[in-house]
Image (cartoon, helix red, strand yellow):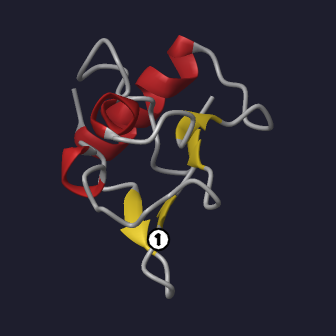
Amino acid sequence: MAYTIVLENCTGCSACEPECPNSAISATADGLYQIDSDLCTECVGFFEEAQCTAVCPIEETCIPDPALVEDRETLMARKIKLHGE
């Protein structure tokens, strides 16, 4: 599943944005951050842990989106589509 940022918890610190290997994280108009689910691979193929979660200083902010459940194979296919093998 793609990750999502709980906007109510986001402080706008920007720690997550440069860590995303897919450039899936961007600032919103109000200075908070969002994740483009079409680009998020949960860092599959890059890291063992989603980097947004690893660097976010606020717990329960970068979380798996329960509405977008995807298996590892789907996430890896997206990674290959975005970056090649």
Residue 23's place in the image compared with 72, above or below, is below
Q: Position of residue 36 (x, y in %)?
A: 52, 57
Q: Position of residue 77 (x, y in %)?
A: 45, 27
Judge from the rendering whether residue 37 lies leftward or rightward of residue 33; answer left or right.
right
Q: Is residue 76 above or below residue 37?
A: above
State the residue in front, 31 or 68.
Answer: 31
51, above or below 28, in the image = above
Q: Position of residue 35 (x, y in %)?
A: 50, 55
Q: Could you tell me which residue is drawn at 46 percent across and 71 percent down? A: 32
- Identify the residue at image location x=24%, y=42%: 21
Whether residue 75 sits left or right of residue 15 in the image: it is: right
From the viewer's perspective, is 55 left or right of 37? left
The quarter of the picture where residue 85 lies is top left
Few, some or many residues within 10 Å of mark 1 (<14, 14–19, 20+): some
The picture quadrant where one finds residue 68 is top right
Q: Amino acid at mark 1?
A: Leu
| Percent of width and height locating residue 49 | 34, 18
The front one of 75 and 50 is: 50
